[in-house]
Amino acid sequence: MKKIIIFIFLLLAFVYSFFLTSWSSSYIMIEEDWKNHIVFTPEKVTEPQQIYEIDKFVYAFKIDPLLSMVCVLSFLTLIGFIVFWISKKFHHKTKVY
């Protein structure tokens, strides 16, 4: 039961931090010098709506690094929990007595 509560808490932390990170990353499109902030988007892009999501995340990391790190770490921890539970179930089924 304790693991499920931790999982739900991490899920809520991820959803909340992802929403706020997405919110702060959307400000790159209204910057006048948005082309100076892009890293992965090709230089031939002319509209700010064509900016890659990874560039938006890098911009959000520059603006608010703590919130972006919470988003990444909670996501990686969630994936770790899921992989651990799946591997535990798989290992339990294949165990020969």
Image (spheres, rainbow, N blue to C red):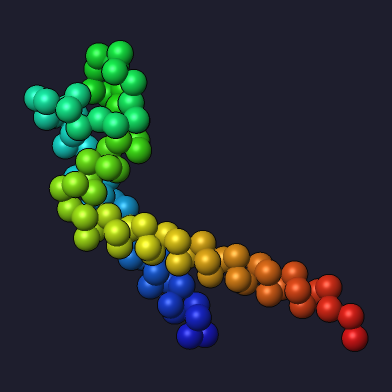
Q: Is residue 2 left or right of residue 92?
A: left
Measured as percent of width and height from the top left, residue 5 is found at 44, 79
Measured as percent of width and height from the top left, residue 21 is found at 25, 50
- Identified at 25% across, 14% down, the residue is 46
Up/down of 49 relative to 78, above or below: above
Measured as percent of width and height from the top left, residue 55 is found at 30, 35
Up/down of 72 relative to 43, above or below: below
- Which image quarter holds the C terminus? bottom right
Residue 30: quarter of image: top left
Residue found at the very far left of the displayed protein: 32
**Closer to us: 86 or 72:** 72
Residue 15 is at least partly visible in this image: no
Q: Is residue 29 left or right of residue 40?
A: left
- Identified at 33% across, 65% down, the residue is 13
Measured as percent of width and height from the top left, residue 90 is found at 75, 69
- Identified at 42% across, 59% down, the residue is 75
**Closer to us: 42 or 56:** 42
